[in-house]
Amino acid sequence: MANVTYLIGAGASAGKRGDNGYIIEGLPCVNEISDCLWSISSLIDRTSIPDNLEWMDPQIGLASIDDWEEARKNLWQSLSSLRIHCEQNATIDTYAKKLVLKKRQAAFKELEQLLALFFIYLQLQNYPDTRYDTFLANILNSNLHFPQNIRVISWNYDSQFEIAYSGYDNKGELLVGYKNAMFDMDYEIIKINGTATFGNQTSIATLRKEIWQKIWAIKGEPNRSEQLQREQTWVLYFIYLYQLYVVGKKDNTHLSFAFDSSEPGEKILNSIDKIISQTDALVIIGYTFPFFNREIDRRMLQNLKPQAKVYIQDKYPNRIKQNFKAVKADIPEEQIEPKEETDQFFLPPEL
């Protein structure tokens, strides 16, 4: 039985876009984050705090309407500032690394917290990329877990896998490892950049269900007033999370950039080394091998067998192929197979 490893990048969570360009499902790609931040910050800017708000919480500094209004303005300013940094730098990751190189550790940690909150908000509100659901339907065994010969290594810190998995097992969780997790088990998914959750949240899948059920239950197509109410409710919940985690610092995020040497990362790399060394087929989905990650990519792939088969699934797989060869030059050309179809995650014949 061949061992198949999936190497996942941001393109794997890109989902679908409508005719107007808005995200229908999934998450923004790197070049869409700035526009997404602008859209959300604009929504926050035009949202008013209702007089009969029931979410007062003096313990986190939201004891009055004035407190909520101040938190709303602070959140708007934080997201607006983040959007500016996105536009001034090649990617948000570039800005994050710049903060680390300049030793602005406090600003870097705040960025991690805010970015994690941003992705939580998007995933609470948006439908997940449906390709994850189909992938799990194909590979999960009778115990609702990955077969021993399939593992995932992801550069993404989103929870698309976990949200999709909640549709199969609403009590259990996938075994997900990240830098500040205990590496005392055989993880099904390893996230190199950590995961955008906080504290004891191992997944936002359960939170997403609770929020959708608790905040509103709109049946059918919402009318205009219901749509406004829904938008307002999401903004209020976003403000609450911002005050709790970013301002109140209740818990640190599990999002942890791989380049941040202040975080212990050797255990996760050792675990990845083991998986890669046993890999017979590597399936690369939505990952471009940016120079930004080259040192870690080389460390990861140095143990890939020269006889391993490599599949590259992307809209433009041949571009990625050149980047892959720059990282791993000893894989023969005939063993690298581009896959341009992106409607489903590729299932190689080795499975």
Image: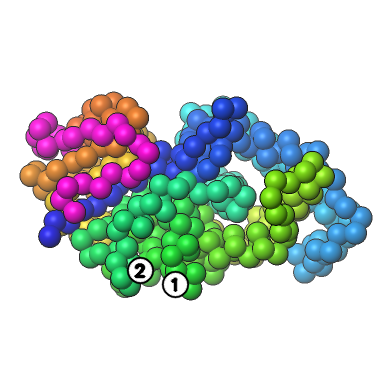
Q: Which residue lies furthest to the front in this view?
A: 220
Q: Is residue 142 left or right of residue 198?
A: left
> What x and y, as percent, mark residue 92?
51, 37
Residue at 75% of width from left, 53% of height from top? Answer: 233
Q: What stretch is highlighted in magenta?
A: 328-351
State the image coordinates of residue 273 (x, y, percent, origin top left): 22, 56
Give the residue type that dot 1 points to.
Gly
Q: What element carries label 1?
A: loop
In the rendered image, residue 335 lying in the magenta stretch gets the answer yes
Q: Cα distance, mark 1 to mark 2?
A: 9 Å
Nearer to the camera, 345 or 61: 345
Q: In this view, does 340 lie above or below 219?
A: above
Which numbered circle lies on residue 172? 1
Quadrant location, the C terminus: bottom left
Residue 191 drawn above or below residue 39:
below
**Residue 200: numbered disc:** none
Marking on residue 144: 2
Q: At 12% across and 46% down in the image, what residue appears?
A: 308
Q: Which image quadrant is residue 187 in? A: bottom left
55, 140: nearer the viewer: 140
Q: Which quadrant of the figure contains the N terminus? A: bottom left
Q: What residue type is labelled 2?
A: Leu
Q: In this view, does 324 lie above or below 251?
A: above
Answer whether residue 304 is visible to the viewer in this image.
no
| Principal secondary structure, stretch drawn in magenta | loop
- Is label 2 in a helix, a strand or a loop? loop
Decide: marks 1, 2 in contact (CB < 8 A)? yes
In the rendered image, which quarter is residue 244 located in?
bottom right
Q: In this view, does 54 lie to the left or right of 150?
A: right
